[in-house]
Amino acid sequence: MITGIDLWTTNSVAGITNTDNDNFKLVPLGKDRIPTRTVLFEHDNVLFWDQWFQEYIRRKSWRLLESPKSFLNTPEEVETRFDGKWRKLSEILGQFLAYVKEAVDREAWAEVSTVILGRPVHFHDTDEKLDKLAQERLERAAKIAWFSAIHFEFEPVAAAMSYDSSDLKEDDLVLVVDLGGGTSDFSLLRKKWDGEFEVLGNDGVYIGGNNFDTSLSNSFFADFFGKWLRYKDAGTREFDIPAHYFHRLGEWDTIHSLADARDREHFNQILHGLEWEDKIRFWRLIQVRKDGKGFDYHQMIERTKIWLSSADEFTGESSFLRDNFSYRVGRVLFEENVRQLGAAIQSKLQATAKLGGKKASDVQKVLITWGTWQIPLIRQLISQEVEWIDKLVNLDPFAAVGKGLALSWKKFL
């Protein structure tokens, strides 16, 4: 038995393959569902999403760690106080992978020691050393989880392995577009005579769904929490509220740091120096910090982004705040602020399609994974290529890569 684990930025999936008969199945990691959110909580020990999520929502008193994979590519390995002590990121990811391995072993009725881990084309866009270091950290995490044989496969290649390619002829070209939460990865593949795929080239960019959430936070929602306000000190001098507070508000990995003691003191100074009508807006930011509402804030943004994927406008309420406010945002505003992100994805996509001296029109199939594709702007940018509109194939956003990883075992064993 071998397992393929697709460690997403926001969710994770695992599949197992019996190497004796090539039987494959996906492993339920979440409660009554195949994927599980890649989230850990700190309480008396380390807990995971489906085990204690409702309790977290009720109490809001535990440390939430979201999207740990996003920080693999830093020059110095990220350390954070977790589970009562300072822990390296590879240790924390090791605990998460051990949780996944436990589910895999239970499903296989045996200990599964061989793993094929998915990885983006680039953990880091420009630095090869940091890219290599990120994979080494992920390998270290897999060893902590007691996997003894560890292999890596590009996530877009795994997506192609999951596709029933019977409609493709030998030498046909396939472009895999993997739009995830943290990265957008592209691979140009050629189908070989034996049904396998030869990689002609890979490219990618460290832009994904989380970047669209952050952009929506900075360009729209942060205004409801005091962005652009000015406050006075005791000497009546005016100051801008520091922009880094709102940058931290919009990022999963930094929103919890708003609870630092130094920030609390400064927040009180700012609140005291604001005009009365402005205090209401800034008090909302204090609530996010004081009441542990970071998860709710990001859920509000994600819900808005998803709605704007199929509607021209969305109206909602911040029901998680004591000072509830209503808001209305249009798709035009959202797309104006994310167009630069979309253009970066399109540029890399065009370059990948032309690797090896090929032309965009030579591509026979464009395989799409994950939900960022649902954003109309992204659909438009991808469909603009020559004759691609009839070549687009939507793969299962949850299962495709995990299935392809598990089915690629013959390349490694």
Image: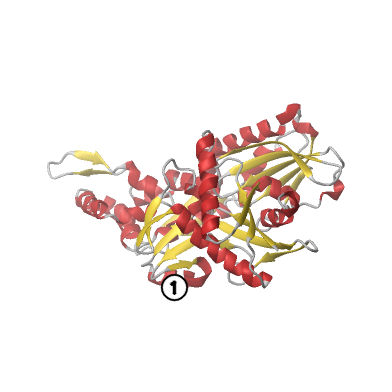
Residue 387 lies left or right of residue 295; in this view the side is right
Which of 230 and 119 lies nearest the eye of the viewer? 119
Q: Nearer the viewer, residue 17 or 253?
A: 17
Quarter residue 379 falls in: top right
Circle 1 sits in a helix, a strand or a loop, which is it? helix
Which residue sits at x=76%, y=29%? 359
Q: Residue furthest front?
A: 148
Give the residue at x 42% y 61%.
64
Name, please, the residue furthest toward the top. Answer: 357
Residue nearer the viewer, 208 or 270: 208
Location of residue 102 by image quarter: bottom right
Q: Find disc 1 in the rendering and name its residue.
A: 55
The answer to whether residue 389 is visible is no
Examine the rendered structure and indicate whether residue 151 appears above or below residue 63.
above
| Res. 373 visible in picture | yes
Label 1 amino acid?
Glu
Residue that sits furthest to the left in the current view: 235
**Dividing the image into 4 quarters, which one contains the N terminus?**
bottom right
Picture coordinates of residue 321, whole percent (x, y): 37, 62
Q: In the depicted view, which residue is nearer to us: 92 or 393?
A: 92
- Left or right, residue 347 beside residue 141: right
Q: Position of residue 339 (x, y in %)?
A: 55, 37
